[in-house]
Image: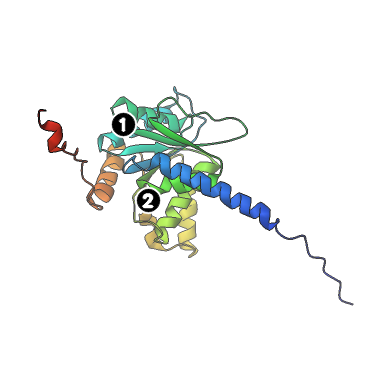
Amino acid sequence: MQTEIKFLEGPQSRWQELKFVVKVLMEFIRGFRSLHFIGPCVTMFGSARFTEDHPYYQLARQVGAEVAKLGFTVMTGGGPGIMEAANRGAREVGGRSVGCNIVLPEEQEPNAFLDKWVKIRYFFVRKTLLIKYSYAFVVFMGGFGTLDEYFEALTLIQTKKIGAFPVVVFDTDFHRDLTQHIESMKEKGTISPSDLNLFLMTDSVQEAVEHIRSRSIVRFGLRPRVKPKPFRWLLEES
């Protein structure tokens, strides 16, 4: 005798779904309006849990400074820890520093080294903004969120949904197990051998900066911004 299947209740009402779509749309509009003029970015991912005296914080601060010297805007998730360090490094050398801060139950305030920031409610909207304006990605030490952002960027590059932007991952010891797992995926055929070329694993700041310069600035023909000349009538005496 065949047992009758009782199906579970379906999706929310169409009214609830419409309200959700409107909320998401407004999040995107607010993000686009806030970040439209920030220029080419390098987005840096990393944990919010490291304090100023931690070596990982100091590394991110140095990398943020060196990337800013290339002319990029340094973009982060806008919070504390490694995000703060990267923004701080950019600010200290006169570079531009922006953040996409996530709204969490435990309030996460934008760090003090941002020139501009936007608060976002939904993680998927935030990830879109972090990726949309970037010509390179730097992955520092972090947890689930950092890995989520790292593999999101890799997947979009792998599937050609975005350009072949460089991805740099710091520190080989911290990510040793992850590297082994990626090698295992290659051996089992779930990724292609060529996919290992989508990222650079390094401990060298200079190697990372040169990798970004050659595979972002040179490859995509990025040039220093030329200040517009004033209109002639502004130079004429009355």
Report the side of 139 relative to 14 (left or right): left
Choose between 71 and 121: the one closer to the eye: 121
Q: Is residue 218 visible to the viewer in this orientation of the structure?
A: yes
Q: CA distance from mark 1 to mark 2?
A: 21 Å
Choose between 28 and 151: the one closer to the eye: 28
* Disc 2, SS: loop
Name the mark on residue 65: 1
Quadrant of the rendered image containing residue 4: bottom right
In the rendered image, residue 23, in percent from the top left (x then y), is placed at 57, 46
Q: Which residue is mark 2?
A: 199
Q: How is the image coloured?
A: rainbow
Report the side of 216 relative to 48 (left or right): left
Q: How many marks?
A: 2
Identity of the residue drawn at 62% across and 54% down: 18
* Disc 1, SS: helix
In the rendered image, residue 191, in percent from the top left (x then y), is placed at 46, 62
Q: Is residue 139 visible to the viewer in this orientation of the structure?
A: no
Earlier in the chain: of badge 1 and badge 2, it is 1
